[in-house]
Image: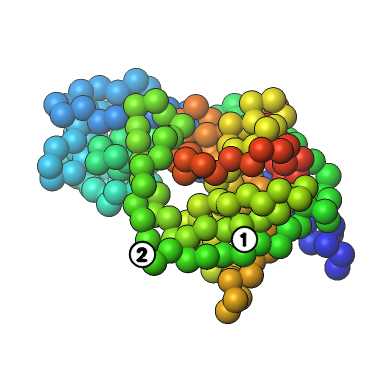
Amino acid sequence: MSATDEWLAWRTARETDLAQEHGWLSLTAFAWLPDQAASLPGLPGRWWADDSGAHVEAEPGESLRVGDEPIAGRATADVEESGSRLWVRHGDRVVELLRRGGRLAVRTRDPQAPTRLGFRGVPTWEHDPDWVRPGRFTPSDRPARVAVRTARDDLVQHATVVGTVDVDIDGVRHRLSAVAAGDGLGLLFHDTTNGDASAPWRTVTTSAPDPDGNVVVDFNRAVNLPFAFTAHGTCPGPVTGNRIAVPVTAGEKRPA
């Protein structure tokens, strides 16, 4: 299989994942949980959070359930920082519980979301082998926890930087802070296509570093984070300084 064919197969898997019934394209609402029981727009029941976790109270007729069990009274759940779980169901909708910046919130995932029903794929630049770049990973002496901006103005998150990746683009060396991402390294970055042809930032995952720290950075596989598709994402932004001063004309474009 050629490199282009491998990329096309990867693109198909990527778009199939996005379009799952309760995937990223199904988000229709986000709300921070209040500290007193209150109604939330579009949802039955009364919702709140305290030191013991998130709570919802509902009457049987409100048709809220956890798994297959209707909620008749109160249901309680919790998640760790940066975690999430699909928690409460209402018809074919699912209420996701998440914790960000020490606060609990809920998001509604609805298979009938217009973003999902209208999805026709993510626009991309054509595959270009010149955008498959060698890089060199230099691990940090100690992972560093740094604050980063997010897709929400009311939220700051933290990234754990495990080192840097040097990658040459058009003869200019760029040093990008890296986070762990499976066997490889995650590079969230800005470039000069942002806000025009591409989303405000994107991310790309490198190959696993070899014993000498060599990695491959395939910008054809640069992808949008969920916030590019929905207003209900909490996606972290790049670490300060992760800016490529040339147009990265590879990977995913801004969704139409």
The residue under label 1 is: 206
Left or right: 151 with respect to 102?
right
* Vertical relation: 30 (above or below) 179: above
Q: Real-space Cα distance between discs 1 and 2?
A: 20 Å
Mark 1, residues whose alpha carbon is within 10 Å: few (<14), some, or many (≥20)?
many
Q: Secondary structure at mark 1?
A: loop
Q: Secondary structure at mark 2?
A: strand
Left or right: 60 with respect to 87?
left
The residue under label 2 is: 142
Residue 246 visible, this angle: yes
Name the amino acid, label 1: Thr
Along the line of sight, the residue nearer the viewer: 201 or 120: 201
Q: Quadrant of residue 32?
A: top left
Name the amino acid, label 2: Arg
Q: Quadrant of residue 35?
A: top left
Name the outermost residue toward the bottom: 211
* Vertical relation: 223 (above or below) 58: below
Q: Residue at point 82% right, 50% down?
A: 127
Q: Residue 254 appears at what percent x and percent y?
A: 67, 32
* Vertical relation: 222 (above or below) 150: below
Q: Nearer the viewer, mark 1 or mark 2?
A: 2
Q: Residue at point 57% right, 58% down?
A: 165
* Mark closer to the chain start, 1 or 2: 2
Mark 2, residues whose alpha carbon is within 10 Å: few (<14), some, or many (≥20)?
few
Q: Residue 110 appears at what percent x and percent y?
A: 49, 34
Along the line of sight, the residue nearer the viewer: 216 or 136: 136
Q: Residue at point 43% right, 55% down?
A: 161
